[in-house]
Image: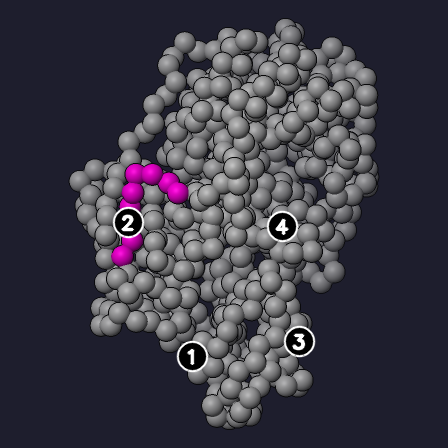
Amino acid sequence: MSVLQIDNAGFLLDGQPFRILSGGLHYFRVHPEQWADRLRKARLMGLNTIETYVPWNLHQPRPDQFRMDGSLDLPRFLQLAADEGLHVLLRPGPYICAEWEGGGVPSWLLAEPGIRLRSRDPRFLTAVDDYFARLLTPLRPYLASNGGPVLAVQVENEYGAYGDDTAYLEHLAGTLRGCGVDVPLFTCDQPADLERGSLPGVLATANFGSRSSWNLAELRAQRPEGPLMTAEFWIGWFDRWGGYHIVRDAAQAASELDELLASGASVNFYMFHGGTNFGFTNGANDKHTYRPTVTSYDYDAPLDEAGDPTEKYTAFREVISKYAPVPGDTVPERAPKLSVPGVVLTERAALLTNAAALAPAVESRRPLTMEEMEQDFGFVLYETRLPLKGPALLELEQVRDRAQVFVDGQPVGVLERENHEFALAFAVPRPGSVLSVLVENQGRVNYGQGIHDRKGLLGTVLLDGVELAGWTNRSLPMATLDGIPFTAATSSTTTGPTFHRGTFELTETADSFLHLDGWTKGNAWINGFALGRYWSRGPQRSLYVPAPVLRAGVNEVVVLELQASPRTRTVDLRETADLGPTDE
C-alpha cells in the first residue's frame, strides 16, 4: 500500500522522499480501447503518475441517472493505470474547466432559474453532494489508502479565479471526506489567485507554463513549508475556431521543465496527451466575445491527438532522466495509419423536411431553451408561422450560439453569437409562411461567470417590433442517427442542412484522419461514432478517427453539412492530420 504523506520538506511515499512526475490524460477524451496504450507511453516517458479530471456532465446526464461504463468506466481506467505501475491524481470537480462543455457542470442545473453555480446555493450543493456520493463510493477501493493508485484528490479547480468563498470549499472538502476520501486533498490556482482558492490544511499547488523559478518562488512565499508542485504545467494550449493552431517550441518547454525539476518541485504536465473533444463536447470561452473551442484537443502535447510521440516526448524524457530513473525501452514508434481516398457519399436526407421523423414537436408560447427541454448537446429546431407578407425584420434577443434562419425552407441568413448578431431582414412571400430557426449549441462556456450558459433562443423574438408567439420546438441532440430516412442522391445540389451517407470497405483497421475538403460546417460520424465538428473557418482541417471505431468489412460515414456540400460529395481518410496553420 503506497500512501502519500505531506510534511514540511515535501512528499513522502511509504515514508520515503517522493517526487510526483505526472501527466494529464483524460480518459473521456480517449477511446477506451486505447487507454492502456496511452498509459504505457506515459510510463515510458518517465512519469510515475497520471492526472485526470472527471466530467460530471457525462457521468450524470440527468439528476436520476449515473453512468460509469464504456467510455466512462473510470474504475477500469484506474485499474489500468495501477497495472502499468502508475499512481493517479484525481480531479473530480464539480467544476473542471478543461475547455470542456460547461466546465463539466451538468446543463440540467441551468434549468433552475437564478441558480448560482460554484457557490453555496443550496440547489447546487445538494446536486454536488449527490454527485460525489454516486462517484466516489465505487471508487473507494482505488484510493491509495485501500491499496489503489489514487494518491490525492483535488478540491474544486482554480476556484481563486472565480470566487473567494472559503466556506464553499470547506463544504466540498467535507463532502469528499464524508464519501470516504482519506488520501491527501489539494487545490490548484495561478499564483495570483492562490489565497482566494486555497483552503487551510489542504495542499496548495500552482499552475503556470513559463518562468518556473519565479512562479515557484511566488508559491513558496505564500506557502513557506510543504511540497512545491505545479498541478498544471502548461506545455501547449488549445485552439479555437477562426484562430491559429497553437504550438510551443519543444526546446523552450523542456528548458522550463529542467528549471522546475532542478528546484526539487513536483510536476503535472497539462497535457501529457490531450485527445479529442468527440461529438459535441468542446467548451468555449467568452471574454466579451464568444469563442468556441475546436474538436481536436491535441494541445501540442508530448503525445499527439493520435497518441504518437512528438518532439516534446523525447525532449521531456531526456530532462526527466536527469532527475529520476527512466525506463530503458526505446521511444515508442508512430502507430500505423490507413488511407482511403475519395469515399463517395451517395445517400442523403434533408434535416428540415425530415425533422418531424427525428423528434416530436413541443408547443410553447415562446421558444424553449435547451435546458428547459432537458437537452445537453446538439441543435434545436424552432418553428412558427409569420402573420404578414413583405419585407420583415427579425430580432432575436439572444442567440446561443448559431442560428440558421429559413422561410418556407429557403435559407435567408445566419446569426452568430460570436459576431454579436441578433437581427436579420428578409422578405416574407405570403401570410402564414413558416419561419424555421435551427440553433446550434457550439459549446457551453467553460471559464468564468460565463458558465451560466443556457442554450437555444433566449428571451423575446420580435418581427417588425412585435413579439412572435406560438412556437414548436424540436430537440435534436444527435445522440443517435437512427431514424434518418436516407435516400439515393439524385442531384448534385442541396438546400439547407443535410445528412449525407456513404460506405467504404477495409481489410484491416488502423487510426486515420477524416478530411472534408470543400465541405463548409457540420458534424461527422463513422459507424455511428461521433467524431466531432468540422468547419472550413479552421484552423482544424481534419478529424481524428480512432482505430477501434473502424472494422474490417463495410464501414459507414455520415456527414451533417449545415451549409453547402461540395458538388462531388466525397471525403478522404488520410494517414496524416491537418490541424491548420500556426502563428509562427
Residue placed furthest toward the front: 584
Q: Residue at x 28, y 65 (%)?
A: 567
Secondary-structure class at tag 3: strand
Secondary-structure class at tag 2: strand
CA distance for labels 1 and 2:
30 Å
CA distance for labels 2 and 3:
43 Å
- Seen in the picture, residue 531 relative to 96 is either above or below; the reply is below
Task: Write down the region rendered in magenta.
Answer: 570-578
Secondary-structure class at tag 4: strand
Q: Mark 4 points at which residue?
A: 285
Q: Give the side of residue 550 with respect to residue 140, left or right.
A: left
CA distance for labels 4 and 2:
31 Å
Question: Magenta stretch containing residue 71, yes or no?
Answer: no
Q: Name the residue under label 1.
A: 410
Q: Name the residue under label 3.
A: 460
Q: Which residue is drawn at 34% across and 53% down?
A: 516
Residue 520 percent coordinates (x, y): 40, 60
Q: Mark 2 points at which residue?
A: 572
Q: How crowded is mark 3: few (under 14 residues within 10 Å), some or many (20 or more)?
A: some
Q: Which amino acid does label 1 sit on?
A: Gln
Q: What residue type is labelled 4?
A: Asn
- Label located before the other in sequence (1 or 2): 1
Q: Give the side of residue 324 with respect to residue 467, left or right.
A: left
Coloring applied to the structure: one colour
Disc number placed over residue 203 in the picture, else none: none
- Label located before the other in sequence (3 or 4): 4
Secondary-structure class at tag 1: strand
